[in-house]
Image (cartoon, grey):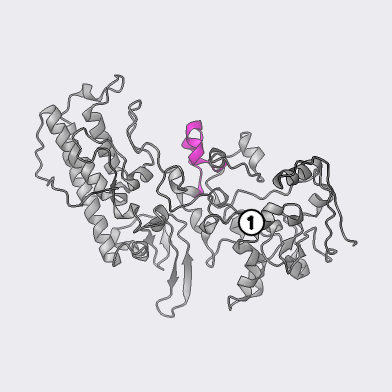
Amino acid sequence: MPSKSFRPTWSVVVALLAAAGCIDERVVYEDVRFPSLPAGAASYIGYSDEAAKRTVCGNCHVGQQSDWAETAHADAWATLQESGHAQAFCEGCHTVGSLGNASSEPGGFETTRSSRYHDVQCESCHGAGLLHIENPDATQPLAPLAVGTELTLGCGQCHSGAHHPFVDEWVQSGHGSVQTSAAGRPECQACHTGENALQSWGVRAEYLEKIDVLEGGAHLPITCGVCHDPHDRTNPAQLRFPIDIPSEEENLCMKCHHKRGQPDPTTFRGPHSPEGPVLLGYAGWFPPSFEFTGGEIIATHGTERNPRLCAGCHVNAFTVTDPATGDVQFRATGHLFKAVPCLDASGIPTTGDCEITARTFRSCVDAACHASEADARGAMVLAEQRAADLVVVLGALLAQVPADEFDNTDARYTTAEGSRFNMQLAAYPGSAIHNPFLIESLLIASIRQIESDYGLVAGSRVSRVPIFAPALR
């Protein structure tokens, strides 16, 4: 087969000129040549210069080539060879072929064994590129956004199994499925569907399912490609946004986990996904007499002691070994997103429910916040029990408040309504752990405000002296 040459279309050429800051609008043709394809390559083109790690695709897609070259995918073959346990069955995920893309036809390294297909290149996700080069307008090899252990395409074809079980864990998590009730409401879709999350973040990348889902097809869950950018290394783990910035607008997790952390006087509904504001110390209703009004009550989980913030507890990898042999049985990736997951009989984390003594608290120790798992477990029990005790006291007081103080149709936002919000916030799963300092302070202040404004007296002897020493940011 002779060397292949092609001419970019107008749109491709103009984009290249604009990226270079060029103001000459003449069409400039670039002649890209690459070695003849080996027999059986099935239209996979691979590297044009293996030593320089220059993909054929990268001759035109210069920006993507430059970004990709900085990722771990660009060194996938060397990583395998240097691992000390390289085997033939590993090679499909460290080379260009049919794994990871929409193609069902074997090709690339798996049929040619050519080194031009080493590493996880563009075509590993986008599929064979020869037809696109021959006629760019005729076909657009798009990578899938959908993933799953049962799919025959996408990240899950390689990032799964006991060695790399990212998708195996993810599919069990809340991110791994679409909550139908929320996905059906436009105001909820930006956080409950993958395609709308990208749109709301201003990500305009193309992907295989885009036209279908945006024109009424089945919604996508929060997949790998929603949180991770395959082409960018700006943030660790190729995340689209940082995880170490204490900001609702900038922190990847908090972009969704921050809804109604503070009261909305226009609705009777309580907190919804308030984790970000709770962690950062300003969630809830601050009573008029609250001594910390205007400040932020922070806890260790929201400070430099836990630099990865949400991910510091919820995304932690560890290995599960056989006690008898020491052999690795499972490599947990933290993509269940459970801070203290239950363990099955083999010690593998699960999404199931269990007694607190059957949970692992190793993430609390690995993050250098607690000296031992026992210490972390004890702190969790104390924080949750303290919040539960104060919620009972506040609930009993609210039950004595006149009903018209909870009238959602008037223009007032009353002490009773604010205190009810704080009670709901304290009872929200995880709040007492994310920030026990804030939750305790809000509940004590609400109890005192209710007593003062409505002339009530709590019958409980639960102490109102804080056991968690709050701090201001």
The spot of residue 77 in percent (x, y) is: 65, 70
Question: Was residue 8 drawn as part of the magenta stretch in this picture?
Answer: no
Q: Residue at x 83, y 66 (%)?
A: 38
Q: Is residue 418 above or below residue 318?
A: above
Give the side of residue 47 with respect to residue 470, left or right.
Answer: right
- Residue 283's image quarter? top left
Give the side of residue 21 with respect to residue 38, left or right.
Answer: left
Quarter the N terminus occupies: bottom right
What residue is shown with label 1?
A: 67
Q: Is residue 408 above or below residue 380?
A: above
The spot of residue 47 in percent (x, y) is: 75, 63
* Kind of residue at badge 1: Asp
The spot of residue 381 in percent (x, y) is: 24, 56
Q: Nearer the viewer, residue 434 or 146?
A: 434
Residue range in magenta is 176-195
Give the side of residue 80 with respect to residue 299, left or right.
Answer: right
Q: Is residue 209 above or below residue 456?
A: below
Residue 452 in view of the camera: yes
Q: Residue at x 13, y 47 (%)?
A: 465
Residue 102 in view of the camera: no
**Outermost residue, top direction?**
410
Q: Residue at x 75, y 61 (%)?
A: 106
Q: Main secondary structure of the magenta part?
A: helix
